[in-house]
């Protein structure tokens, strides 16, 4: 890259994206009842994922204070654990928990990601603020403030993702978690327009994590804590900004040194549409399967096929999986799969398990299940193809489909039905069908951590929109203490 000498030291005007983010956080009201209702279900679902993750030592070994003894009386609670921590470390804990099993919500566009990853920063900061307020005799923030911050974080991450593909330049989507968490944390801290622009500039100056830990040949568990790391970093930057630290108005556009020239091949990062509440209203819930979202409908199709093929596994000649272009690029894998994080990003594995067993759970990615030789035999029979209609429907803003089709062919020339599923149960088009299943997932998750009476108190608080919104954040978080 040829160095460009910049002679003038006069600070430039802020990049457009920085101004738009600050306008949204500080002066755009959220007026959608649907967004608040969906945010409540999103809160329930996200915390359910965290409770389920606490069953896995690979996750829990990362939780707690950053060093032994560094917990904090009056700090933020980590749900489902005894920990009270400084809010930055609590944000890492919560973020790692909710992402661990690849079971929380998803957003798919030019970029993909999991907007509820931002709950780490939001919930930790709001809880810490609430406890400080109570100790100082002030009114604490309430859960409506948390839901509002969730809606904003979803919107920032999701709208930027609509037309800006960071994965195509090798960057991981968690950079959007850091940016969204930084902006909404600044808002929760009372930051003004300048503060939000400042913290957004710092979040962009951090650059982006590489996707090398998310793909073959070395997919690994860092992908399960990367978002917690990003969310906690966003909160850290917001706290730094509140000290009066200056911003960098051309963090994106600075010639040679800015984000766009260094990391985005000179392209401009911009917004496809105004920021409102679109993303929360249209977010995709992972309800049925803890699996990378591009394979959700493949797993559903395989579940439908299970009764037709389970008794004929030895007779299978080949299995054809039709998916979207993104599915081919991200999760089409052959060869040995070394760990659960590798398996839950392999469309062949996520199709084989329900064909064989009629299920797909987090436990099915563990070594004991993966050792079943039938899984790799079926994987070896699979052909993964792009279905161009699925790819078009995936990018269509009026559809946002995530289609897959699965068909099994037998050695005797016969074949099972071709089963195609365009929309997973967590899609907005299947909300009426999906929400009861989401609530059931939530209740099952609570039962893994809490005695019935405590679980019932949590369910009662979360089950009533008005009651939840009015509840002080510290009281809500105390319901989750172990």
Image (cartoon, rainbow, N blue to C red):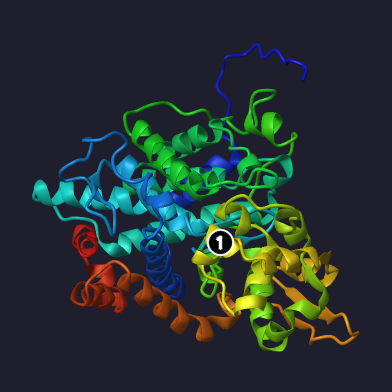
Residue 379 visible in the picture: yes
Q: Position of residue 18 (x, y in %)?
A: 54, 40
Left or right: residue 287 versus residue 384 is left
Q: Position of residue 16 (x, y in %)?
A: 60, 41
For the point 67% across and 47% down, the residue is 215
Left or right: residue 355 versus residue 323 is left
Residue 400 visible in the picture: no
For the point 68% across and 83% down, the residue is 310
> Does residue 457 lie above or below 226 as drawn?
below
**Residue at the right extreme, as displayed:** 413
Left or right: residue 188 versus residue 112 is left
Q: Quadrant of the N terminus?
A: top right
For the point 40% across and 80% down, the residue is 440
Residue 477 location, quadrant:
bottom left
Left or right: residue 16 versus residue 110 is left
| Residue at numbered disc 1 | 365
Q: How many marks?
A: 1
Q: Position of residue 212 (x, y in %)?
A: 65, 40
Q: Position of residue 140 (x, y in %)?
A: 19, 55
Q: Quadrant of the C terminus?
A: bottom left
Q: Is label 1 in a helix, a strand or a loop?
A: helix
For the point 54% across and 66% down, the residue is 364
Q: Nearer the viewer, residue 285 or 336?
A: 336
Badge 1: few (under 14), some or many (20 or more) residues near its Cα, within 10 Å? Answer: many
Residue 5 location, quadrant:
top right
Q: Nearer the viewer, residue 64 or 178?
A: 64
Q: Nearer the viewer, residue 349 or 130?
A: 349
Residue 449 location, quadrant:
bottom left
């Amino acid at each position: 890259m040829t160095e460009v000498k910049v002679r003038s030291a006069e600070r430039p005007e802020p990049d457009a994206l920085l101004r738009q983010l600050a306008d949204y956080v500080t002066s755009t009201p959220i007026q959608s009842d649907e967004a608040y209702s969906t945010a409540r279900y999103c809160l329930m679902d996200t915390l359910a994922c965290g409770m389920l993750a606490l069953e896995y030592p690979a996750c829990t070994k990362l939780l707690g204070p950053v060093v032994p003894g560094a917990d904090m009386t009056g700090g933020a609670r980590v749900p489902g654990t005894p920990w009270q921590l400084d809010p930055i470390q609590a944000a890492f804990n919560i973020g790692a928990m909710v992402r661990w099993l690849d079971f929380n919500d998803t957003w798919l566009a030019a970029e993909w990601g999991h907007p509820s990853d931002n709950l780490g920063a939001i919930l930790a900061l709001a809880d810490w603020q609430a406890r400080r307020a109570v100790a100082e005799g002030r009114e604490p923030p309430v859960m409506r403030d948390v839901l509002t911050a969730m809606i904003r974080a979803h919107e920032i991450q999701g709208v930027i993702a609509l037309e800006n593909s960071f994965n195509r330049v090798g960057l991981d989507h968690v950079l959007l978690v850091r940016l969204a968490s930084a902006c909404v944390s600044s808002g929760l801290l009372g930051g003004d327009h300048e503060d939000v622009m400042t913290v957004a500039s710092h979040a962009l100056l951090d650059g982006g994590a590489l996707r090398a830990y998310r793909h073959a040949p070395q997919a690994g568990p860092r992908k399960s804590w990367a978002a917690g790391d990003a969310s906690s970093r966003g909160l850290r930057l917001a706290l730094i900004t509140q000290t009066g630290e200056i911003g960098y108005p051309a963090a994106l556009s600075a010639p040679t040194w800015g984000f766009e020239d260094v990391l985005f091949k000179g392209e401009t990062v911009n917004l496809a549409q105004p920021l409102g509440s679109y993303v929360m209203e249209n977010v995709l819930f992972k309800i049925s399967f803890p699996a990378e979202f591009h394979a959700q409908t493949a797993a559903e199709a395989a579940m439908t096929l299970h009764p037709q093929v389970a008794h004929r596994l030895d007779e299978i000649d080949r299995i054809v999986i039709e998916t979207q272009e993104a599915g081919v690029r991200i999760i089409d894998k052959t060869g040995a799969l070394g760990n659960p994080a590798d398996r839950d990003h392999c469309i062949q594995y996520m199709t084989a398990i329900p064909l064989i067993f009629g299920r797909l759970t987090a436990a099915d990615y563990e070594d004991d299940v993966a050792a079943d030789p039938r899984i790799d035999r079926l994987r070896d029979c699979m052909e993964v193809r792009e279905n161009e209609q699925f790819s078009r429907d995936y990018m269509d803003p009026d559809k946002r489909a995530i289609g897959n089709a699965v068909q099994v062919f037998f050695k005797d020339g016969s074949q099972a039905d071709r089963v195609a599923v365009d929309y997973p149960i967590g899609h907005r088009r299947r909300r009426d069908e999906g929400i009861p299943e989401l609530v059931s997932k939530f209740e099952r998750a609570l039962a893994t951590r809490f005695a019935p009476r405590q679980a019932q108190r949590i369910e009662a608080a979360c089950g009533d929109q008005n009651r939840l919104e009015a509840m002080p954040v510290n009281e809500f978080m105390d319901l989750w203490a172990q």
